[in-house]
Image (cartoon, coloured by chain):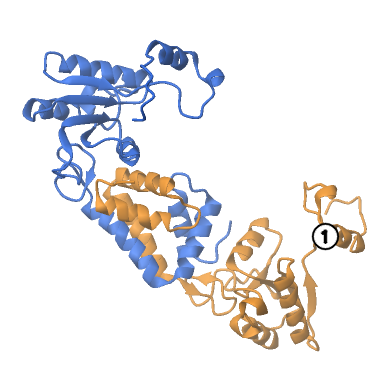
Chain colours: A orange, B blue
């Protein structure tokens, strides 16, 4: 595509380098911004400048934060005795959206994957162990996706936590809401039967 | 969705205000940028600053430009005697991409639409007439989409150009490549038969 303006072309290039945005969408966005006028673009640019200069990593849970601690770790109404261990900030956000968890988090920033050369040292595992030693922690919830790397990470963490007085639990794995039993993989279906839970008529 | 950082939330808000980007995509983009580090975000922000401060409108054709004239109008190898009239810069880009046109453009920046209160005065029609009076123009190609507003605009322009020594043509309307005749609307199909062209075995 030929552009009448180099500035426009650079804007399209910048947007199309982002995940999930193709050149046509980037073009549409660039023209949208150009039409919106100077102030709107300036605001956008300043938001990004803030992101570049102001964004910190929470020293406790390793999520993104504005201060030394993120808004969850610094919130006294959260239950700081229950830590939910997640692979990424995206997973943290997904769990927050469910509004089913009132504890705090710990972002590992990846999973143990010997094939990719990622060992425990490259993840935020030591700070997690330090948190458990220092703070009063009752429970660690492993909210790690079911896969070889995930299972390896959960196994490694559990080994490290042996002997400590902390309850370790893992998120339930089973058939997703709305999915068909016949299309579920054998492993998931088998596990959902082996790990069946008592059924109660009471709505939780 | 709850965010651990206000800066991150503002970034997500900024991206999700763009056309075609939902909150989940905006989240993905914001985290992608946050992961890429300070320099990458700074560059992005500076590109937008350039867009806000440097983008001009070509004084000849009203496309976006870096200088007083856009790269097409200032290109001596383009045929300045043929002006292709388009509704928007997006349409200009689409035609440029076909590489079938070596003339210059004129961006109307809309179509006449009495229902929406858009008259000829709000469009770049007077500058087009001025161009035709001043420059040596052989042909005006109406590359306007077929719709009531488009047809009105073409009709108005043609009336204004009456008496001037300039050839007026309109882009061919008919069945698109790859589409089924049975699903074409009556108007298009009827017109494609009425305006049939001689068939030649020679490849153009």
Left or right side of B57 for A80: right
Residue situated in front as seen by the camera: B119 or B149: B149
Residue A96: x and y in percent read 64, 61
Residue B59: x and y in percent read 15, 40
Left or right side of B162 for B149: right
Callout 1: SS: helix
Left or right side of B29 for A14: left
The residue at the point 62 percent across, 72 percent down is: A76
Q: Where A134 sits versus B68, above or below? A: below
Residue reaching furthest to the left = B134
Disc 1 residue crowd, few under 14, some 14–19, many 20+, Cα 10 Å = some
Residue A28: x and y in percent read 39, 44
Would you say residue B47 is visible in this rendering?
yes
The quarter of the image holding the C terminus of chain A is bottom right
Residue situated in front as seen by the camera: B110 or B75: B75
Q: Which residue is mark 1?
A: A188
The residue at the point 64 percent across, 72 percent down is: A105
The residue at the point 88 percent across, 51 percent down is: A202
Left or right side of A168 for B201: left
Q: Chain of mark 1?
A: A
The residue at the point 58 percent across, 79 percent down is: A60
């Amino acid at each position: 595509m030929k552009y009448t303006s180099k500035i426009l072309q650079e804007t399209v290039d910048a947007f199309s380098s982002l995940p999930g945005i193709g050149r046509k969408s980037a073009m549409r966005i660039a023209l949208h911004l150009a039409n919106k006028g100077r102030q709107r673009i300036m605001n956008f640019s300043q938001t990004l400048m803030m992101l570049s200069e102001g964004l910190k990593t929470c020293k406790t849970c390793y999520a993104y934060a504005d201060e030394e601690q993120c808004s969850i770790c610094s919130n006294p109404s959260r239950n700081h005795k229950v830590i939910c261990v997640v692979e990424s900030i995206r997973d943290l956000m997904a769990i927050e959206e469910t509004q089913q968890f009132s504890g705090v988090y710990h972002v590992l920033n990846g999973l143990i994957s010997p094939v990719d050369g990622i060992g425990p040292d490259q993840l935020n595992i030591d700070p997690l162990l330090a948190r458990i030693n220092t703070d009063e922690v009752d429970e660690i919830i492993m909210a790690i996706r079911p896969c070889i790397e995930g299972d390896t990470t959960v196994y490694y963490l559990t080994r490290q936590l042996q002997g400590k007085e902390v309850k370790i639990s893992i998120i339930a794995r089973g058939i997703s809401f709305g999915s068909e039993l016949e299309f579920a993989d054998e492993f998931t279906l088998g596990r959902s039967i082996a790990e069946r839970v008592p059924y109660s008529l009471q709505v939780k």
